[in-house]
């Protein structure tokens, strides 16, 4: 009992109790225990090693094999009674499950990698096929028309990409048509419109009118006429393409002042544009050619008084201007022409005589679309009316 008591006492002491209890709990698995007293006798040993094998490990550690197992042995001497404690770890048993788990984990990782690789390969082949379809379509596209559109049957991002591409092609096609028309037709129409507004004939008549005013010794009217002519030419040659209604009306008044000097007893001009329309923006040289048409082709050949009225009204989505006169009216061919496509008859003799109106119609269509433009009609009591429909624009 004397030899057992110290062993039991020191086992339960703080120095070896945790290790011993750990050994008791895991002795069947991977942790074993051996104890030798100060005389070198083995008091406790649940390991497969003999006394001599254990004594070969003194105050250190070593690896020994037994029954095909690898063990890690650590020895330590108790400070209380010189007993030697051997903690034996069965490394083979300890790492067996770890190795098994590692093998399973590596296997799962390899299987996952194979699956991922297969999915990536499948997706990449699908994507490359879609891209090849895009590239072939684009490479064989010679013009951004309906033949350049791409059809995608899949319900994925490629359908959205194809839709964006198709929308872009349609927009490019529309822009090409618009720009081409603007570059080739609008420039030509604006050049002819400019020539129709400030043409040598108008300048000659104005200078002839000034010469007549000189003969009549009317210096104030001469000054006003020259100032009006200079303003009209400056506005036609320079300035912004878009101007307020107020600015346009100012130039129109100056133009009509010159015309009334030319026909002092034969032309009455009425201008009634509501004040609330004055700050909207419209293209320059839109209203003045229509008034010129009424003077030249409408009232100038009358024996009596010629009357021209410029009226305006505001609609919810448009500005409406009307130019009415009591002249001879439009030939039926011109009315029919405006019901069809005036640009198809630019070389006709009758069309050339109404070039200012045709240019205005073309400019408005190019700038704002065919829902805006001119409407021509003859009045039942005689004369004609031109209605101009323009969008409501508040900024230049």
Image (cartoon, rainbow, N blue to C red):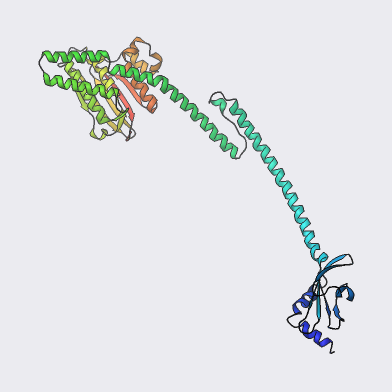
The residue lying toward the viewer, choosing from 392 and 56, is: 56
> In the image, residue 225 lies at what x, y percent?
17, 20
| Residue 265 against residue 156 in the figure, above or below | above
**Which residue is outermost to the bottom?**
2
Total labels drawn: 0
Taking the spot 49% from the left edge, 26% from the top edge, the residue there is: 173
Relative horizontal placement of residue 34, taking residue 120 as reference (left or right): right
At horizontal 23% and vertical 30% (from top left) the residue drawn is 273
The foreground one among 394 and 204 is: 204
Asked if 18 appears above or below 72 in the picture, the reply is below
The image quadrant that residue 63 belongs to is bottom right
Where residue 174 appears, x then y in whole percent? 47, 27
Residue found at the far left of this picture? 217
Above or below, 188 relative to 11: above
Relative image position of residue 391 (x, y in whole percent): 34, 31
Q: Quadrant of the C terminus?
A: top left
Q: Nearer the viewer, residue 169 or 36?
A: 36
């Amino acid at each position: 009992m004397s030899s057992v008591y110290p062993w039991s006492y020191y086992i339960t002491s703080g120095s070896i109790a945790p290790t011993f209890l750990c050994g008791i709990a895991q002795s069947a698995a991977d942790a074993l225990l051996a104890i030798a007293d100060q005389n070198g006798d083995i008091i406790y040993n649940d390991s497969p090693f003999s006394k001599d094998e254990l004594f070969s490990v003194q105050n250190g550690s070593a690896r020994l094999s037994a029954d095909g197992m690898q063990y890690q042995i650590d020895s330590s001497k108790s400070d209380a009674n010189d007993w030697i404690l051997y903690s034996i770890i069965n490394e083979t048993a300890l790492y067996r499950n770890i190795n098994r788990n590692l093998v399973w984990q590596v296997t799962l990782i390899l299987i996952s990698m194979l699956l991922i690789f297969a999915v990536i390969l499948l997706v990449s082949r699908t994507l490359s096929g879609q891209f090849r379809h895009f590239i072939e379509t684009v490479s064989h596209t010679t013009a951004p028309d309906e033949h350049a559109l791409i059809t995608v049957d899949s319900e994925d991002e490629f359908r959205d990409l194809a839709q964006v591409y198709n929308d872009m092609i349609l927009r490019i096609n529309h822009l090409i048509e618009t720009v081409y028309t603007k570059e080739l037709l609008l420039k030509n129409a604006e050049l002819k419109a400019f020539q129709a507004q400030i043409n040598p004939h108008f300048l000659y008549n104005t200078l002839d009118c000034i010469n007549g005013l000189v003969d009549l010794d009317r210096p104030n009217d001469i000054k006003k006429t020259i100032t009006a002519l200079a303003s009209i030419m400056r506005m036609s040659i320079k300035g912004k393409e878009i101007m307020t209604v107020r600015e346009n009306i100012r130039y129109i008044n100056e133009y009509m002042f010159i015309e009334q000097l030319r026909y002092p007893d034969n032309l009455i001009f009425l201008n009634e544009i509501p004040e609330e329309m004055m700050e909207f923006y419209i293209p320059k040289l839109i209203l003045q050619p229509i008034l010129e048409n009424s003077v030249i082709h409408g009232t100038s050949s009358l024996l009596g008084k010629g009357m021209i009225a410029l009226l305006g009204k505001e609609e919810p989505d448009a500005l409406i201007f009307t130019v009415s006169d009591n002249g001879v009216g439009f030939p039926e061919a011109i009315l029919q022409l405006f019901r069809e496509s005036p640009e198809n008859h630019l070389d006709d003799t009758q069309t050339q005589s109404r070039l200012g109106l045709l240019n205005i119609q073309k400019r408005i269509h190019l700038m704002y679309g065919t829902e805006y433009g001119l409407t021509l009609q003859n009045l039942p009591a005689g004369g004609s009316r031109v209605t101009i429909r323009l969008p409501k624009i508040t900024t230049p």
